[in-house]
């Protein structure tokens, strides 16, 4: 591509309304332009990246046996009434009526349409499993679109839906999709983690989110430094470390009049915080039989409410006890609670169970026990995983320790079960002629979002640094001054021809009026991984200057060796 | 692709609500399914074809220097207010408001959005010309969607828009697009014609429609049997043939009491119809100075109202005179009019000017003149092209004769001029620093429609016959009975592997329970251009049976020669 015939559209200034780096760089690099709030046009440079992402996804979905289809953007609202989502979805579902007054919506997702298709086309277990996908425009009427294409209203998704005879088949395909997603993000060249996601009633293995790790991510991800284990911080299992030490200190009741919080206690009595216990009182839900229950976590740990809600003794929804309830049941305020002499049931976090010589409230206002020891001073209560993991915790799979980083969710795979197939009566006959609703899986990738996430993970102060596989161009060919030097022009034209014929995607910056500095900055801003600078001075030495986007030094290469040199570098 | 793992979705019965053959065959071949009126999902077989069409278009647009972009489906209505089309477009423009009450529409076309982009990004003549295209989903709220994807509400278009400094540059790019369109339709393997279209004020050279020739086409196309000349029948220039012969008959006034029409006259007096003249009286428009004017065409020809409206003596809008106006001005009824002794001005079609010894009304009720001759009996009036062409007319480019066939419009290229750039103030500075609105061109291809049109042109009683370039699969590999014959299965698996590795797209019909007849019918219905049947009996003779979709005889080929055989056939 000759820059003189290309809408480069690079911008020096950082656009005022762009907050995140990917949004700034996509505007500055001429990848996108805003049409209206949450609506973006993709310019040639942006679209080149987008199409490479699409192609990698397409190839891996095809390799995984999924069949590509294309469903309409506009969907009849009737189908959403059938599934029950018409009333659940809220104003993010953009609805409208056609000229005849029929109700439609712009599809934010296609479960209804594909299930309608499946109920018409799939009739026998012999046809199953089938997995359909599309790469298609979606619409979600976000109340506050932001971060460019990261959270836009119109966006491109790869959405796939699988249909099965039974749950075992769904799990097989789920695993196939999990593996395909790993191959996709590997090929995209991104640092990502497959994260076990909360699936409510379905259970932990039924859903994974794929996160691209980046400081700007909205989610905190805990992952092992030595294995593939990764989970949302809220869902990662917290493991207690070590054995409980033998008691060394005597049990002492002390006055602690000013210590209403762990922080007060630690600072006033110079205590190591990991020798303190927090006692949090919650009201067990009706499903758990009601009543108050105390949850114990180490002073430096945080109660994880999701985990608490999953305990049969607590159950959802979790509600913290009021001060009045606490005082009535225990006879002390919330700042002075502890496991010793506690008149209500109690559950200890696993890390609390391995503590010794610790400090906790005495269930008397203004008093704490110091030197508490399990089994010596009180029996060890039932234990459970009650807390958020923290950096350095052992990985739950027994391999390595947890690191916590932020992630951008770019993919999600989910075992839907029969929610939609039951609602829409998408059934097949099994081997015995019995009609069964098909268990379904769904598998999404935010295609436009992947582009932004790739930038959030790969940039420096000069611009984007594309992973090789999705760079808009592989090579920038930059003459120093075409106008002045016919020799330079001749060599550039020759190299452009040779590199193009060798199959490379080259941006040849043949703009005559731009200075070298501008051309170099543009190539760096756009993030082209490799550049070749052709200068008059180099011609005398028979060299051109090569530099990779991540390097800071030039390599001098003879012009007639540069094609092979680049072949080797780009292998 | 193994048929057992593929949504073949073929249907034996012709669907009741499908009128045209492409709609019937696309449903029967499992290419599309209706979601709602004018909304279709593309199943795997259909999408494979659609993507091949897209890819050919993309490659040729890129080769022609156009830059691919992607604009949103949803467009702010503000831009349509700016261009003035919000009020002109009518209910085909589907409008809606977002959750904040802002007005939007689903884009039926993208002139406004691209012009908005251009006014922001293009500032100098040095950037021009630029030509942007996209392959994208469009929406048009047709009042009566019909013929499947031929006239659906949601459809895919390739739309391109070029921007220029001056009209000469627009004409250059227009020609480049014309040539690119020819390459696209050539590569698609379609029989098509580029047809000069009516452009109103812009003039004949400013617009061409590309029509795929097919009996079911909505438009009648006149084209030369010896050159590339083609035009919509209404616009094709009608040429008079031959020289006027010398008078042979005397002028005679005859009573023709029952002859109110040419048909009456011809049958009552045994006249050759091409020796009769029709006299049609129209009211010249105000722009042409008003008054009545008579238009003469040969008895077997039809007046072309579009052509008449372009004459300065008539001008638009054309209105036929009432019987009362005719009687008042001429003194006779419309069934007895003619050029001799006519008291109002008159214009003759070119073919009338070369007539001799002809018959026309006498401008006296119930009387006609026979044996009229120009220059002998009355002066030749001014002549003009006033009629529709007919089959066999000389081609206006002087090469060959006109054939008239029906066509399906699949592409349209158009010199827009400055309509949008003026309305949206999309200007650039020229060499002298003067700000000028950019002349624009627009170039569309109905991508989904191309698929239907290709079928309308290529089918037989057994199904679709795809042109090689856009067939969903190149080869159908069909075993006679996999279950019974392990040898057959072994050979099929081997051939499937070899053919796939050789780069062919193969549908391997490995369905165990289907009979051979069903498998053959499906392959023919889907229109796969080449098929290989593997039978137990052939294994003994060391042969497999090859047949092309258009052939009716098998060719026997040795299994180990079939890959090379197919390579040769598919070259």
Image (cartoon, coloured by chain):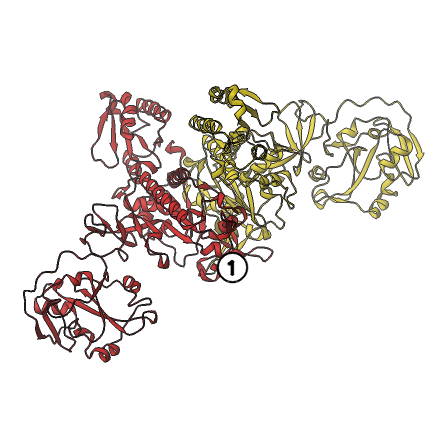
Chain colours: A red, B yellow
Can you see residue A27? Answer: no
Q: Circle 1 is placed at which residue position?
A: A81
From the viewer's perspective, is A256 left or right of A539? left
Q: Is residue B473 above or below residue B293?
A: above
Number of labels in the image equals: 1
Chain for disc number 1: A
In the image shown, does A460 or A337 lie closer to the viewer? Answer: A337
Query: Height in image: A158 above or below B410?
Result: below
Q: Nearer the viewer, residue A473 or A33?
A: A473
Dot 1: what SS? helix
Identity of the residue drawn at 28% across and 61% down = A307
Depicted B270 relative to depicted B40: above or below? above
Q: Is residue A103 visible?
A: yes
Q: Where does the image place residue A423, in percent across and percent down from the top left?
A: 49, 57
How crowded is the residue under tag 1: few (<14 C-alpha within 10 Å), some, or many (20+)?
some
Percent coordinates x, y for residue B245 in the rendering: 82, 22
**Front-lying residue, B238 or B491:** B491
Q: Residue B454's spot in the image, x, y percent?
A: 58, 34
Q: Residue furthest right?
A: B255
Write the residue at 60% across / 26% down: B550
Query: In the drawing, does residue B154 fall left or right of residue A330?
Result: right
**Where's residue B455, x and y in %?**
60, 35
């Amino acid at each position: 591509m000759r820059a003189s015939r290309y809408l480069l559209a690079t911008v020096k200034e950082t656009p005022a309304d762009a907050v995140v780096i990917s949004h700034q760089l996509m505007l500055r690099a001429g990848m996108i332009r805003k049409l209206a709030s949450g609506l973006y046009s993709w310019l040639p440079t942006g679209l080149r990246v987008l199409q490479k992402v699409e192609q990698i996804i397409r190839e891996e979905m095809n390799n995984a046996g999924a069949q590509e289809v294309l469903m309409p953007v506009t969907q009849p609202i009737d189908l959403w009434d059938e599934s029950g989502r018409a009333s659940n979805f809220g104003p993010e579902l953009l609805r409208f009526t056609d000229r005849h007054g029929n109700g439609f919506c712009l599809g934010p997702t296609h479960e209804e349409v594909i299930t309608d298709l499946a109920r018409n086309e799939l009739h026998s277990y012999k046809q199953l499993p089938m997995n359909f996908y599309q790469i298609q425009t979606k619409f979600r009427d976000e109340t506050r679109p932001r971060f460019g294409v990261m959270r836009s209203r119109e966006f491109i998704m790869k959405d796939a839906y699988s249909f099965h005879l039974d749950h075992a088949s769904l799990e097989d395909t789920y695993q196939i999709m999990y593996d395909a997603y790993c191959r996709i993000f590997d090929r995209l060249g991104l640092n990502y983690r497959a994260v076990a996601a909360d699936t409510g009633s379905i259970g932990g293995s039924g859903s994974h989110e794929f996160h691209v790790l980046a400081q700007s991510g909205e989610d905190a991800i805990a992952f092992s430094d030595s294995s593939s284990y990764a989970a949302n911080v809220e869902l990662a299992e917290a493991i207690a470390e070590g054995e409980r030490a033998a008691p060394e200190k005597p049990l002492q009741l002390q006055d602690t009049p000013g210590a209403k919080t762990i922080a007060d206690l630690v600072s006033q009595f110079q205590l190591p915080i990991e020798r303190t216990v927090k006692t949090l009182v919650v009201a067990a839900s009706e499903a758990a039989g009601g009543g108050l229950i105390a949850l114990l976590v180490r002073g430096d740990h945080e109660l994880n409410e999701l985990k608490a809600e999953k305990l049969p003794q607590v159950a959802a929804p979790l509600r913290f006890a009021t001060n009045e309830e606490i005082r009535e049941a225990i006879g002390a305020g919330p700042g002075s609670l502890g496991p010793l002499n506690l008149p209500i049931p109690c559950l200890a976090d696993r890390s609390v169970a391995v503590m010794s010589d610790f400090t906790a409230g005495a269930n008397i206002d203004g008093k704490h026990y110091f030197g508490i020891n399990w089994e010596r001073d009180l029996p060890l209560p039932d234990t459970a995983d009650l807390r958020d993991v923290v950096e350095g915790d052992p990985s739950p799979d027994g391999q390595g320790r947890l690191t916590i980083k932020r992630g951008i969710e770019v993919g999600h795979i989910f075992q839907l079960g029969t929610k939609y197939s039951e609602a829409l009566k998408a059934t097949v006959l099994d081997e015995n002629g019995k009609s069964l609703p098909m268990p379904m899986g769904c598998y999404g990738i935010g295609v436009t979002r992947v582009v932004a996430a790739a930038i959030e993970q790969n940039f420096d102060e000069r611009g984007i640094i594309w992973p090789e596989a999705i760079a808009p161009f592989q090579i920038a060919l930059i003459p120093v001054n075409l106008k002045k030097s016919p020799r330079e022009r001749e060599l550039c034209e020759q190299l452009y021809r040779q590199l193009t014929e060798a199959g490379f995607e080259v941006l040849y910056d043949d703009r005559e009026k731009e200075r070298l500095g501008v051309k170099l900055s543009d190539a760096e801003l756009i993030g082209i991984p490799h550049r070749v600078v052709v200068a008059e001075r180099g011609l005398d030495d028979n060299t051109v200057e090569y530099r990779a986007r991540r390097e800071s030094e030039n390599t001098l290469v003879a012009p007639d060796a540069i094609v092979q040199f680049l072949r080797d570098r780009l292998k």
